[in-house]
Image (cartoon, grey):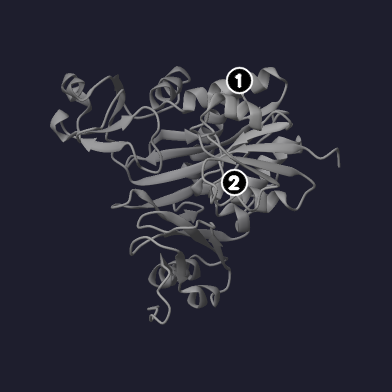
Amino acid sequence: MDEPRRIALLGGGQLGRMFIENALRYDVEVHVLDPDPACPCAWLAHRFTQGRFDDHDTVLRFAADVDVVGIEIEHVNVEALEALEHQGKLVIPSSTTLRILQDKGLQKDFYVRHGIPTAAYALIESAPDIERHQELLPAFLKTRTGGYDGKGVVPVTSSANVPAGFDGPFLLEKRADIAKELGVIAVLGADGSSRVYEPAEMVFDPELNLVDVLLAPARCEPEVIERAKELALRVAKAFGSPGIYAVEMFLTPENELLVNETAPRAHNSGHYTIEACASSQFDQLLRMYMGWPVGDVGMQGEAAMVNLVGEGGSGMPHLVGTEEILEMPGTFIHLYGKAQTRTGRKMGHVTIISGSRNKLERAVAICKAYAKVVPMPSPGAHITK
């Protein structure tokens, strides 16, 4: 193994935590920058720095003595990443890629320029501009920057639907007919090699607009699976820089695939790869940072992931249903180390691996029935399973 590399990670949430858990198997250092001193990575990183990853000078100081710079969240200072690239540091994703993907409008224009199928859209400055695009209604109105986990998106049929304080500029996107939503992770190595994980079917909680259950491989015809993998790889190669690309797609009732969004980082739709694949999405990232070969993406059986989302208010987190989950074969609990739970907050997930689809589906049902993350009860209080 070559000299140990120091990796600077911008963002200290659960994605960073799972990355470090994998990286601890190797002789590498992971330094983390995050504004929250109690973030999931704070006690696990080799060096933790409290600070804003969207501040130019803070990022430059933080990454001054590292070899590689990666991100755990998109909302980082791109100009700082560009300056670090000019210093000769390896930055994944590249500043050029991230600048496009931070802005939903630039992202959509990028798809059109590269012939990548996506839903019809218009870029508008303010809510009244909706009325000039009747052909797109009904639609989704999305803030071009800053949205995350369904935030910054509202359904609209006219300008009257736009909530007060929901400020532009906006992406106005025609509402597509959706049979399924798929997440496909493509890996692009520095040497031009590539791999694509099996597409995952994402089932959303309609109230929280978060992934509730994920199934991999997706329940689609083999021809659709292959087209989804080819499309994800097209997207990755269009950006032309090494990294992992989580490509979210809509499958229409006519079996057409439309690219919705792309994240140039580890993604919720790829968490199943930790147990189901020889090389997880987090291992692939480490391989990128270290200059190692791209890993094996083959699956061991079928997989499901159930998101553990906080419910019942705020407080110290407590997982209910541990015994019921762990007595099932092939189940793995991941808690994210967040100091406080609150209703709707992602607190962890359960991965289930099985060679039988029927057994997998039964395990998902049991997990959903018993698993809850709630505020820690007061001493002496009865905990309902």
Per the model, the C-alpha gap separating discs 2 and 1 is: 22 Å
Point out the residue furthest to the left here.
Answer: 160
Q: Give the residue number, with chain letter if any, for mark 2.
A: 16
Q: Which mark is residue 70?
A: none
Q: Give the residue number, with chain letter if any, for mark 1.
A: 82
Inspect the image, locate mark 2, and give the three-letter code of the amino acid beneath it. Answer: Gly
Badge 1: how crowded within 10 Å, few (<14), some, or many (20+)?
Answer: some
Q: Quadrant of the C terminus?
A: bottom left
The mark that comes first in sequence, 2 or 1, is 2
Residue in the image at 45% along x and 64% along y: 317
Residue 258 screen position, x and y as percent: 39, 34
Q: Secondary structure at mark 1?
A: helix
Q: Secondary structure at mark 2?
A: helix
Looking at the picture, tell me which residue is in the foreground, 292 or 89.
Answer: 89
Based on the displayed image, in which of its 4 quarters is residue 242 positioned?
top right
Residue 313 vertical position relative to residue 202 in the rendered view, above or below: below
223 with respect to 150 (left or right): right
Badge 2: how crowded within 10 Å, few (<14), some, or many (20+)?
Answer: many
Residue in the image at 44% along x and 25% along y: 107
Based on the displayed image, in which of its 4 quarters is residue 130 positioned?
top left
Inspect the image, locate mark 1, and give the three-letter code of the amino acid beneath it. Answer: Glu
For the residues bearing labels 2 and 1, Cβ distance under 8 angstroms: no
Residue 323 screen position, x and y as percent: 51, 77
186 with respect to 191 (left or right): left
